Image (cartoon, rainbow, N blue to C red):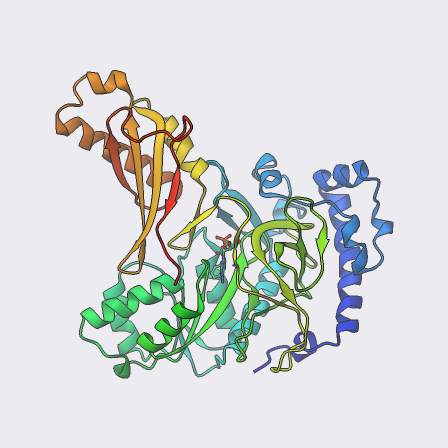
């Protein structure tokens, strides 16, 4: 079902006119309320009056995660604090998270866009929907939650955690829909099989999966093991959270809610705009956000845009699956992890040498993070030949990493010089997950 036919099936011409009007308004708003944007635009000699149509977007400055970090925590917020009603946070490249404040109007837009996604997956008021993304600073839990309520289906806020209890609830409550990361969906399937529960005993029929990359093969596996139809859901906290784009019944790329989030593709090296069909870095401008509007935010996600009409009747532009990233961010159990965050934790612990490795793997469909770090020579010679100080140090490092990353890593403390150097530097990240 199309939730908002007016906006999802507009003529391309009307959509571009609407986007142009909204862009002019948002540019004037940030120019007058966010000193960061005003000075960037002044440096580029652009004023709000220069923005008359959506094509003028190329005159505007880009925004990066580094800009958000430099203006931590509220420097890019346009609305006064009294208008902000919710604050979320996502990982930054170092210890500092990215803070995003939402006004009441932003939350309404978020729920509206999320309801469009769910309706497109075929969710109706009759459905009972389990939201198994994390509730908290992460946008996944609350973002999907309010979309389900807004649509009028029942929401079961299961969040992440006890998988067996979750499966019992799916069975006992007759849960028909689920939202979680695709890897967690596979983990659910596996746990279910171990518990001796067959998918025919469940009423699951639809799933909204995202927050991490996944493939067509994973889709087939999830569908056959859980007995549901699996749809892609894409989003990022800086722009809104889950709801930025969504698959329809054709499952041929994801429709962008482009009346609110204007997408562009650029060459990540030259920053030149690329035409539809070309693969490059995805960039979004928020056209209606009032809490923290962003101009030309560089997502670092690589994909392409498709503007051919879709058989479902929606006319909004589609984006392909995310093919990779133009930075080194890892997504582990749906959580964004930058190697630099691991490094800054290790460097803050005096016993650790600056030689480490990060190994990411997938065991029983759950991502694992192993951090190997060399102990400094001076601590090693002070008695690291016995096991207990090593175990204690491993625990200390694991606790420090957990508090920054929100993921429990396996920490292995290694002897000085044992990690091997490549050109004087250890190869830092090994990702053993093969997305088949
Ligand atoms: O992951 C928001 C979200 C929650 C999306 C639940 C979908 C479902 P962040 O933590 O800010 O926000 O991470 C955003 O995750 O730039 C992509 O690299 C990746 N990502 C999100 N959805 C998908 C997807 C949430 N469907 C980053 N496919 C993005 C591939 C995805 N990658």
Where residue 10 sits in the image (x, y, percent)?
72, 76
Q: Residue at position x 44%, y 63% from top?
A: 214
Where residue 386 sits in the image (x, y, percent)?
12, 25
Q: Residue at position x 55%, y 74% from top?
A: 252
Position of 12 relative to 132 (above/below): below
Residue 158 seen in render: no
Q: Of all residues shown, which one is farthest toward the front?
A: 423
Residue 371 seen in render: yes
Name the residue nearer the viewer: 352 or 102. Answer: 352
421 relative position to 14: left or right = left
Instruction: Write down the quadrant of residue 115 in the picture.
Output: bottom right
4 relative position to 237: left or right = right
Instruction: Write down the quadrant of residue 46 in the picture.
Output: top right
341 relative position to 247: left or right = left
Q: Quadrant of the C terminus?
A: bottom left
Q: Quadrant of the N terminus?
A: bottom right
Where residue 177 sits in the image (x, y, percent)?
40, 75
Position of 338 relative to 20 (above/below): above
Where residue 16 sits in the image (x, y, percent)?
77, 67
Name the residue nearer the viewer: 264 or 31. Answer: 264
How many numbered discs?
Answer: 0
């Amino acid at each position: 079902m199309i939730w908002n036919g007016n906006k999802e099936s507009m003529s391309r011409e009307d959509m571009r006119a609407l986007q142009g009007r909204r862009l002019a308004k948002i540019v004037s708003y940030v120019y007058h309320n966010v000193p960061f944007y005003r000075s960037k635009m002044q440096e580029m000699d652009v004023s709000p009056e220069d923005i008359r149509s959506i094509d003028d977007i190329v005159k505007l400055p880009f925004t990066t995660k580094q800009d958000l970090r430099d203006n931590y925590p509220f420097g890019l917020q346009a609305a006064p604090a009294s208008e902000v009603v919710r604050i979320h946070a996502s990982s930054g490249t170092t210890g500092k998270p990215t803070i995003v404040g939402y006004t009441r109007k932003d939350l309404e837009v978020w729920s509206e866009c999320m309801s469009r996604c769910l309706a497109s997956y075929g969710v109706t008021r009759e459905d009972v929907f389990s939201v198994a993304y994390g509730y908290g600073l992460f946008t996944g839990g609350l973002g999907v939650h309010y979309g389900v309520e807004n649509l009028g289906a029942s929401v079961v806020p299961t969040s992440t955690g006890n998988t067996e209890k979750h499966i019992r609830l799916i069975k006992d409550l007759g849960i028909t829909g689920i939202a979680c990361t695709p890897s967690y969906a596979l983990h659910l399937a596996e746990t279910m099989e171990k518990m001796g529960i067959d998918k025919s005993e469940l009423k699951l029929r639809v799933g909204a999966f995202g927050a991490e990359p996944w493939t067509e093969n994973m889709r087939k596996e999830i569908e056959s093991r859980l007995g549901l139809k699996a749809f892609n859901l894409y989003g990022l906290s800086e722009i809104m959270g889950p709801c930025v784009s969504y698959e329809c019944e054709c499952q041929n790329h994801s429709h962008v809610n482009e009346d609110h989030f204007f997408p562009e593709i650029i060459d990540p090296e030259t920053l030149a705009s690329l035409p539809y069909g070309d693969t490059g870095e995805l960039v979004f401008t928020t056209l209606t956000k009032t809490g923290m509007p962003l101009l030309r935010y560089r997502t670092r996600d690589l994909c392409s845009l498709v503007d051919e009409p879709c058989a479902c009747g929606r006319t909004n532009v589609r984006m392909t699956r995310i093919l990779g990233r133009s930075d080194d961010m890892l997504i582990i159990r749906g959580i964004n992890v930058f190697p630099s965050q691991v490094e800054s934790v290790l460097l803050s612990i005096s016993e650790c040498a600056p030689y480490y490795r990060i190994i990411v793997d997938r065991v029983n469909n759950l991502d694992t993070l192993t951090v190997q770090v060399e102990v400094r020579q001076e601590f090693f010679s002070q008695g690291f030949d016995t096991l207990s100080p090593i175990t204690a140090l491993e625990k200390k490092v694991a606790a420090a990493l957990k508090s920054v990353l929100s993921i429990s890593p396996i920490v292995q403390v290694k002897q000085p010089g044992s990690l091997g150097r490549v050109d004087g530097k250890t190869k830092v990240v090994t990702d053993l997950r093969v997305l088949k």
